Image: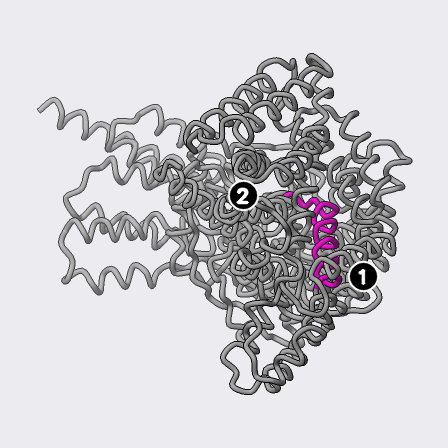
Amino acid sequence: MNSTTFNFLKYLSPTLAAFAVIWFGYAWFVGDELTLPWQVESTFKTRPFLLEYFQINGKPGGVVVDQLISWQKFRTGELQYLVWPEKLLLISIVAVLVLGTLSITYLDRFSYFIFSGIVVFCFIQLRLEELGVADPYLSYGLIGAFLLLTYYFQAINKKVSVLVRLIGILLLYLTFGLLVNFLPNMDYPNLVVLSFGMVGPLLWTTLFIIFIAGDNIFSLFKLTTQGESKGKNGLLHFGIIGFVYVILVSLLFMEKNEDIELNLYLIEPSTLLIASMISGYFCFDPKIKTINVSGDTFVLKDWLYPALCAMTLGVLAYAEITANSSLKDAIEWVIIISHLAFGAGFFVYALINFTPALFQNIQVWHIFFQGPRTPMLTVRLFCMIMVVGGFLYLEYRPYYMAKSGQYTMLASLAEHIDNDLLADQYHKQSNYFEFYNYRSNYALSQKAKTEKEKEEIQERLVAILRGGENPKARVAYSNHFDEKGDLYRTLSSLMYSKEVEYDDKVQNNLGLAHYKYQNYDSAFKYFRESLGGGAFVSEGNLAALNYDVAAQVDFDTTINYEYQDNIHLKLNRQALANAQGQSLLFSIELRADTLLTREQLFYLYNAALSRQREDWKVVDDAIQYYQSSPKNAVYNTFLLTAQSFLYYNSGQVNKGFRTLESVISSNLSAAGFPYYIKAVWAFDQGQSDLTVESINNAKKRGFDAEPLNEFMEDLKFVTDFDQTADISQQLKGVQAEKAELSEAEYQQALIRVAETNAFDVNTTLKAIELLNQTEIDSQVEYDLLREALEVNRKSTDLWEAYIYSCAKNNFTAFGETALDQLSELADQQKVAEVRSEFEQILEEKTTFQIR
């Protein structure tokens, strides 16, 4: 042999097995999450909230707004078709085909024909006629080329090197692969062949599992008797452990057949399989000697055995990831039946053959497969009869499951190429072979279009649940009733399920169902229990629940929130903080694509409603960030409304009113609610005329909500109207700090006061007067007064000051227009005095310019 090629293959095959173990572990950890991912559905509910600004007739008064509360439940998404598991499975099958073909050329003639027959049977199962190319000559050509090439290496020219044999075999399968990929006029022909021909690899897998099924008994026998000074003790240990092993496999059989319920950690078919693979590798040499396989049998151990391990684990991993439950169940049945038959048979065989020797303290584990009393061939025949008996007992269920899994693969591929009619037919064929098929039933429930198909959704989901516990099917089943508005069955379908005992997502949805049923204590219980894999959802729901029950039991501070950056949790906690008049730090992760999500929009809105916010500028920056993007134009009115609340609640009255005017002007026909807000704010600032005007405007635009009507009723009984705007303390604070400020800082402080609240006319004008006493451009005074008049257009003092500022800046036309406005508010004498002063300032300005 070519030692380099031999060593390469010797290391290649275990490497494939190692990768298969990693893939299997990944599939065990991920499950079907990639194929059928969990999704979170958010529902936003409004809660009326009194944003209190004043007392009216001895009771709180203000704006009644709707805060947003987020409720979340789990649901399943669309079934996904994953190409990469198909390709990995195809690679593992091709590896077995290549290494198996190479290995049988080194066996004796009898063994060669046996193994060749198995390979030819697999080729027949490929159903190459489905490709529609050269039928049936493509199949005949593959079988003929295989037999000619392998027979040449095995019988005619045995001295050919490993490298030449490998190259010849690779060329054979490469040529076949090219023909399959390029001759047919279809998409994914290689995956079509894989799906149609899956029965062949499953046969290899079945034979391999049967081959290693009894090897765990050998390992137990060796471990309990090797090195034991007293053979009786070793026999006792083996008898106990072996009996427990057989009992466990029997329990697995009964559990799989739904005769009992068994839930032991890691006691499952895949565990048996991996243990048998390890045991089978280490007992391969003594076992193969008793099977009458001659030739260079070490190639079977070094090349073929690891590749078969890789393929078997690959099939299981593929079935797990792609949610092909029938394929997985078929293999698990093969594992359980073969391990039960061979485990029991080998256990009895060991006791019959080696009990006398062990009593004589003789080490006999190395001759385990050469029993002196009962020949191993007889035991194997007995075990095979038991395996066949197991299949007969199950009425060939594993075979039908395998066929169902095959049609599920075909249906999934048909869905991937958008052939819905063919996919529907294959899914139904899959259900014909296996009524409880997970993927096919779920796919058909998703694809339901006609009324009859929609009526069958419930039956299909029930079929999945009858086949075994399935949290995703359980959630889909309850959501089906929820969508129909059947609250009782939504609750009962979850409450009486087995999945609710351990699955956090089912528990979360059950908590939500209890909440809708107003069972708040049960809702709290299940939300708390689901703080596992679904904590980020359940925490948000707990905060939402706390909003409704905080008046009786406030448990918000008792929960150690793990996902405090979750937007839904922050949204709900902000709403609660607003209702309780508390402060909550604002934080948001701005999206780089500037696209505003509903969750962030409502969080910004709730945050803007807070009257206890020192970090209002951070909220304002976030709102402006999203306002700057045209992608969010549809939310512009909502953002402006939130921004107006933010400004007003933070004491920036002028900005609040100006922003609210932008909301009104953006859609006059829907300006009823903004006018209601303006009426309340005007009352808060002591502007009775503006209050009445805003109420009338709200009514004109069809806003007839209860809060507005109540506010109007309260106004009728107001006897002592003492509301007033007052920001004088801000100005006093600036004046007190004047000595510590530079002139520029002092000017900016005065400008901030003048920009704050135009309804406090005296303080606004006083701030402007102090500003004029510094070296500042007269344009600044004009801008401040113009902005103040945008908010408070009823103040004669502001108009007077504005007119004089127009004169100082030579804005004659603006001044004349302002005089007209003043004439509507003041008497003629006052207007005449202002006009006289206006003209005098202009004259002085003109005289100064001439000089």
Residue 745 colored magenta? no
Q: What is the distance, in whole Å, between disc 1 and disc 2 at their CAs?
A: 66 Å
Q: Quadrant of the C terminus?
A: top left
Q: Residues within 10 Å of mark 1 (few under 14, many from 20)?
A: many
Instruction: Name the residue nearer the viewer: 820 or 67.
Output: 67
What kind of secondary structure does the magenta stretch mostly adopt? helix
Instruction: Name the residue nearer the viewer: 615 or 221.
Output: 221
Residue shown at the point (43%, 52%) measured from the top left? 588
Q: Is residue 270 visible?
A: yes
Span colored in magenta: 322-342
User: Which x, y percent locates residue 474?
Assistant: 76, 55
Residue shown at the point (25%, 49%) measured from the top left? 769
CB of mark 1 within 8 Å of CB of mark 2?
no
Instruction: Name the residue nearer the viewer: 242 or 622.
Output: 242
Residue shown at the point (26%, 52%) measured from the top left? 750
Q: Is residue 644 visible?
A: no
Amino acid carrying mark 1 in the image: Leu
Residue 299: assigned label: none
- The residue beneath circle 1 is 491
Amino acid carrying mark 2 in the image: Gly
Q: Quadrant of the N terminus?
A: top left
User: Which x, y percent locates residue 98?
Assistant: 53, 33
Is residue 684 left or right of 843 when viewed as pictured? right
> Is the residue 255 above or below the residue 326 in the image?
below
Q: Residues within 10 Å of mark 2 (few under 14, many from 20)?
A: some
Whichever of callouts 1 and 2 sits on the residue coming sooner in the sequence is 2
Q: Quadrant of residue 374?
A: bottom right
- The residue beneath circle 2 is 295
Is residue 677 left or right of 269 when viewed as pictured? left
